[in-house]
Amino acid sequence: MNRNLRWVCASMAAVVVLGPANHAFTANDVLAANERVLVIAATGGQNALVQTRTLAMVHAAIHDALNTIDPRFERYAFQGDAVPGAVPEAAVSAALHDVLVTVIPLFGTPAQRANALATAEADYVAALASIDDGADKTAGIEVGQDAAAAIVALRTDDGLAFINPPYTPIAAPGFWQPTPNPTPASPAGVSFLPAILPGWGNLSPFTLRTGAQFRPDPPPTLDSEEYAAEYDEVKALGEQFSATRTSEQSEIALFWYENSQLGWNRIARAIAASRAIDLWEQARLLALVNFGLADGFIAGWNARYVHNRWRPVTAIRMGDADGNSATIADPNWNTYLNTPAIPDYPSTHSVLGAAAAEVIERFFDDDAIAFTTTSGAPFAGITRAFSSVGAAAEENADSRVYAGIHFRSATVEGLQLGRKIAKFAVQHYLAPLR
């Protein structure tokens, strides 16, 4: 199996089967739009955090455009009117296009931006070509453009300019420091990287009042029995060549290493397709899922850089300096998979998985949606089955301990934070109109 571990910033009668390949959707539906956002955002050099902002903006615009044409759910940003007869598919395509061409120039290299813009334009031309010309098509385009303009205006001063403030690691026990990684071996490529976007937690959330709204309490103190127990757990299970980690636990670590916005949008799309929900329901589901993912990163980053907790690899190599007689240092200890360059607590991988799963369960009012899915890059082709999306979220959290990159408390608090974010979003946004 490919061991290139570069971090890229993973109660129906019938089981839903999911795969990494594109679904056979029409050019203008919401599920296809979701896939295209992910492709174009990556082409434009957007990392995982930035992609969640882009996804949330696109899906807010699509949702608002459709609910302006035919009001079924509360709108998010745009409160204007549509011309009667406006074509919904034209509105979807225009909303997608206009948000993308606004955000693409903000990230990536000039070449990446040029490629992404060209792809977005080609997609737009092809999508509109599939719709008969006429006044209704024009009206659909106009409402999509208006909905896109509303969300772009709302996010113009959302704190994006302040996502990368000066940050100096604290060289003391318990505090995050740049981490070594096993592949490639230190000090090459992905080792000892500077902290990633330390100001992202100050970005305006999409549904939360602030990024600190549900901030977790501090992690266990270094001198506690709880800390020693989770230290021993990750030291045993997460070591590069662990004899304690089972083959299934290793598979779980690899399976869920994919970036969260990719895996959880794929799961949401396939479940939506299996339930045969219409454009409006697709739009609401994917807007809420991506609000949860975006706010999961914002709230998680807010907590991570406040608590500023060291990662297991730093802690285990410095175990003799933590003031806890029960922790035994191993200066040569390595993780199974690479550690992203951000503090430990809470695990945003766990936050995002729990947020997406909770939204899906609440949307369908079903906590037992069984499915089988296959992983994407960097460890593509691993297939796993789940009894529910909640069970998948739990395994997703466990994977970070098996990978050696999070303490258990970081994953537990991550799950709790993600569920709170999703519950708040579903209760306060995009409600059905009665």
Image: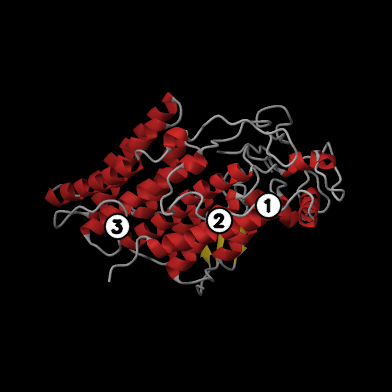
Q: How is the image coloured?
A: secondary structure
Answer whether labels 2 and 1 touch (C-beta < 8 Å): no
Could you tell which of marks 2 and 1 lies nearer the N-terminus? 1
Q: Could you tell me which quadrant the C terminus lies in?
A: bottom left
Q: Is residue 382 above or below residue 5?
A: below
Left or right: 207 in relation to 220: left
> Could you tell me which secondary element the residue under label 1 belongs to?
loop
Could you tell which of marks 3 and 1 lies nearer the N-terminus? 3
Q: Which mark is residue 75?
A: 3
Q: Label 1, on which residue?
A: 219
Q: Label 2, on which residue?
A: 353
> Could you tell me which secondary element the residue under label 2 belongs to?
helix
Q: Is residue 2 above or below residue 291?
A: above
Q: Residue 146 carries which label?
A: none
Q: Classify mark 2: residues with Cα within 10 Å, few (<14), some (14-19) or many (20+).
A: many
Residue 25 visible in the current orientation: no
Residue 66 visible in the current orientation: yes
Left or right: 185 in relation to 82: right
